[in-house]
């Protein structure tokens, strides 16, 4: 796979402007963000970070574009999103390869991420004809009531490095068909993916003679994110990333009484009861733990295993981990690629030491890999450790392939209590063939997470369902279901079609 050809196909230069209004690129910042691939440590390209001046130009352009875009009928906005999906289909292989090379996930996962973008476009196109409200009867004679939804305005999107393109698409596709315009602050750890996406949508907007302010881009460090969060002109900020980042964004947005959609960290667990089909679940467990090198917010962090099957599961996992191939993620024979950067490696190593210090028994040892093929110094070994749920390090989400095995006794309720006893509440799963255990897990007595699965792992959410979690995961929902409603403002209307003016609740007011 020729990276140079892929970059050329996507319009990526050696040096790239860091802000854009549609296809109009801006570059007045003084900082340069260099993107090094965690795959081989090579410099892919650089981005001239957006300045405060660039940001202001983008916001002004967004405001201007919104006045016209919102007046375009929703099905026509859906047509633009349809065209965007078609453009992504054309660029799928190249964009998927760039995601893999710049972020470090496997090529198949890179392709899968672009497919998520395509899928959400398809979903949004259909939805553009279903932005329905609700009609209801009034308590007053000759009155009618209904609820309707209107565009909210400018949507600010702050995305994370681990899904450098899909999270943006989840938000924009829905926001656009709702009549909103979007300004995107991507992760500075994967800036070239954002440049590529902006160029794809810019071509679509240009082909339809639409205002570029419908899609604006500002690449920068934390300062740009702070500007976006504090901006009263942005009624909704959708932020994906760490809990620490989300708390900061949520506080700033909340202080100005704006709305925030937060999709933050997960500390996801799989419960294995005595009724689990072990032959079926091992591949799901391994992928959940090591897929994307443990850098998914839905990665499996904890296995809560009944003591009657504990040794069988442990031995099967140890055997499976021995078969894992670590290396270049663009080589499809490898299972595990690199972490995003050396800072992530440092956190991984510190987490292992913290676990050992608290009493964890490491049964599949970790460490940083060196030598030919590992020149980036971002490759690490997936780890399995026996631990207790109350350990501080187990309560914390480490964005790396570290899996904790936790033993439980008694019935499924004990396992659920262990699972729920962490600050995060994103994804969860139970492995069992027992209907009562399944239904208990899915009931209000069960998992407290936004996602609860049966006989599949914690990773691999589908576009059709609303994605997000509870507690320190932030409570926001992106993607499918009725997640579109967060991108709109709801209005209740009462219409009097009679000749008198009765008041609600039978109140009399005579003059």
Image (tube, grey):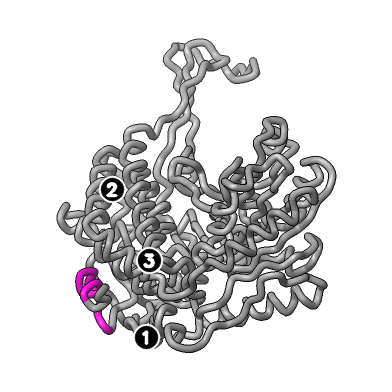
Disc 2 residue crowd, few under 14, some 14–19, many 20+, Cα 10 Å? many
Q: Position of residue 4 (x, y in %)?
A: 24, 78
Q: Which of 272 and 340 is in front in this view?
A: 272
Disc 3 residue crowd, few under 14, some 14–19, many 20+, Cα 10 Å? few
Q: Nearer the viewer, residue 177 or 357?
A: 357
Residue 332's label in the rendered image is 3
Secondary structure of the residue carrying tag 3 is loop
Residue at (33%, 81%) from the top-left corner? Answer: 44
Secondary structure of the residue carrying tag 1 is loop
Q: Against 290, is 375 above or below?
A: below
Most extreme residue toward the right is 410
Residue 42's label in the rendered image is 1
Whether residue 228 is visible:
no
* Membership of 9 in magenta stretch: yes
Residue 81's label in the rendered image is 2
- Tell me the quarter of the image containing the N terminus: bottom left
Quadrant of the rendered structure where residue 393 is? bottom right
Residue at (36%, 37%) from the top-left corner? Answer: 127
Residue 419's label in the rendered image is none
Say which of marks 2 and 1 sits in front: 1
The answer to whether 149 appears left or right of 381 in the picture is: left
Secondary structure of the residue carrying tag 2 is helix
């Amino acid at each position: 796979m020729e990276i140079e050809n892929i970059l050329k196909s996507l319009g990526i230069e050696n040096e790239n402007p860091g802000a854009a209004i549609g296809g109009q690129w801006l570059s007045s910042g003084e900082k340069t963000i260099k993107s090094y691939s965690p795959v081989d440590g090579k410099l892919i390209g650089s981005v001239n970070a957006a300045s405060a001046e660039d940001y202001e130009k983008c916001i002004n352009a967004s405001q201007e574009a919104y006045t016209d875009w919102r007046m375009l009928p929703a099905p026509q906005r859906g047509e633009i999103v349809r065209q965007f999906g078609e453009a992504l289909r054309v660029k799928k292989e190249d964009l998927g390869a760039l995601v893999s090379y710049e972020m470090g996930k496997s090529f198949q996962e890179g392709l899968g991420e672009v497919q998520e973008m395509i899928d959400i476009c398809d979903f949004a196109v259909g939805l553009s004809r279903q932005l329905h409200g609700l009609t209801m009867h009034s308590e007053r004679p000759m009155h009618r009531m209904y609820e309707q939804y209107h565009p909210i305005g400018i949507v600010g999107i702050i995305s994370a490095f681990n899904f450098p393109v899909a999270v943006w698409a989840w938000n924009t596709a829905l926001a656009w068909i709702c009549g909103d315009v979007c300004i995107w602050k991507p992760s500075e750890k994967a800036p070239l993916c954002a440049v590529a996406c902006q160029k794809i949508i810019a071509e679509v907007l240009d082909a339809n003679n639409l205002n570029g302010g419908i899609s604006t881009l500002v690449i920068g460090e934390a300062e740009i994110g702070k500007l976006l969060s504090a901006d009263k002109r942005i009624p909704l900020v959708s932020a994906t990333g760490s809990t620490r980042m989300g708390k900061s964004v949520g506080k700033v947005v909340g202080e100005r009484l704006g709305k925030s959609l937060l999709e933050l960290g997960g500390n996801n667990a799989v419960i294995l009861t005595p009724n689990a089909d072990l032959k079926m679940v091992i591949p799901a467990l391994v992928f959940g733990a090591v897929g994307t090198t443990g850098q998914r917010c839905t990665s499996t962090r904890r296995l809560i295993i009944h003591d009657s099957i504990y040794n069988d599961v442990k031995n099967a996992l140890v055997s499976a981990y021995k078969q894992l191939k670590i290396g270049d993620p663009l080589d499809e024979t490898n299972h595990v690629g690199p972490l995003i950067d050396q800072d992530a490696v440092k956190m991984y190593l510190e987490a292992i030491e913290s676990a050992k210090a608290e009493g964890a028994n490491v049964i599949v040892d970790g460490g940083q890999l060196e030598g030919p093929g590992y020149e980036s110094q971002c490759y690490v070994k997936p780890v399995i450790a026996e631990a207790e749920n109350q350990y501080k390090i187990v309560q914390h989400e480490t964005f790396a392939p570290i899996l904790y095995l936790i033993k439980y006794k008694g019935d499924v309720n004990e396992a659920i209590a262990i699972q729920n006893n962490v600050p995060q509440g994103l994804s969860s799963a139970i492995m069992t063939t027992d209907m009562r255990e399944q239904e208990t897990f899915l009931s209000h007595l069960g998992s407290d997470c936004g996602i609860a699965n049966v006989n599949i792992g914690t990773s691999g959410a589908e576009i059709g369902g609303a994605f997000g979690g509870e507690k320190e995961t932030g409570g926001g929902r992106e993607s499918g279901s009725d997640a579109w409603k967060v991108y709109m403002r709801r209005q209740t209307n009462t219409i009097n079609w009679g000749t008198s003016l009765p008041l609600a609740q039978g109140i009399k007011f005579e003059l």
